[in-house]
Image: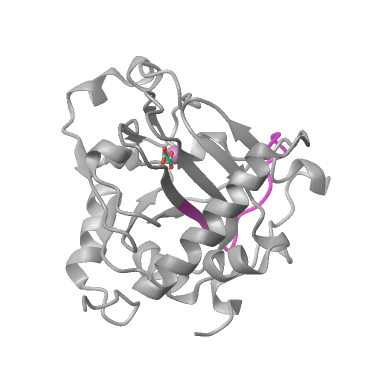
Amino acid sequence: MAKQTTPDNLSAEQIAHYREHGFVHIPNIINPEEVVEFYDVIYDFAEAKRKSEEEHASVRDSEVFTQIVNFWHEDEGIKRLTLHPNVGGVAEKLAGVPLRIWHDHMLIKQPHNNAPTTYHQDQPFWPHGESPNSISAWIALCDVPVEKGCMTFIPGSHRYTDLAPQSTRDGDKLFDLCPELTWEKRVTVPLKAGDCTFHHSRCAHMATPNDTDDPRVAHIIIYMDQTTTFSGKKHIVTDPLALEAGVLLDGDMFPAVNDFPKL
Ligand code: SIN
Ligand code: NI
């Protein structure tokens, strides 16, 4: 059986790749038993929310994807994955600083959705004073070949730190804002179930459409620097918390990786 990648066996090359290019492919971040368990947890939860009549700002069902944001604190199964110490431990080693949870989201591309997630950086959407080392783990809970909606990255684009937000459904916005990125090479990363990619929050990325008969099920865990403060900008994760601009984003909703349950 293929070896799990852990904070202890993560190689210097993998860390260097992440820091140089802004993303890295990490095989077997969770083990095969966990893949089976978490596929059901995530898919069943997301489908129930998608089909529920209840209007909820954190549930978005569009042609691009079904996106369910930040429910880990309401469900023990999701919590076990979002606060997974192996994933958090590897994220911290790649980032090189202490991290805490910003939020998670389930992203399901429905069969034959016919719509890519278009090029964007994540960070410009967030209400963060500064979180220069924020990083996402994009975990494949099923095999995700190119045809099923895997991620493509623009290596080195994490060095562009002042771009305005770019829509996930408007393919040209990133390149309008930053024409030179048009000519950078792009790297597409198909993943086996249990693998993940980590990407820096400013590394530009897109995902291909799902052209298969089955859903593409991914769970994304986003970590931020432990020192991140709230900027005051609107965001569905912080709006219900009524925080004052400038406060540290800490407490129960934003647990530190070093406080995660041990394996
Ligand atoms: C996707 O999986 O469709 C997009 C993921 C992301 O934008 O981080
Ligand atoms: Ni993104």
Q: Quadrant of the N terminus?
A: bottom left
* Residue 139 figure quarter: bottom left
Q: Please, which colouring scheme is shown?
A: one colour
Q: Position of residue 235 (x, y in %)?
A: 68, 37
In the rendered image, the residue lying farthest to the right is 242
The foreground one among 107 and 250 is 107
Q: Is residue 17 left or right of residue 41?
A: left
190 part of magenta stretch:
no
The foreground one among 117 and 148 is 148
Region in magenta: 219-235
Above or below, 26 against 103 in this view is below
Q: Residue at x 23, y 48 (%)?
A: 190
Above or below, 195 against 241 in this view is below
In the rendered image, the residue lying farthest to the front is 213
Q: Residue at x 33, y 77 (%)?
A: 6
Q: Position of residue 172 (x, y in %)?
A: 36, 16
Q: Position of residue 73 (x, y in %)?
A: 70, 62
Q: Residue at x 26, y 53 (%)?
A: 191
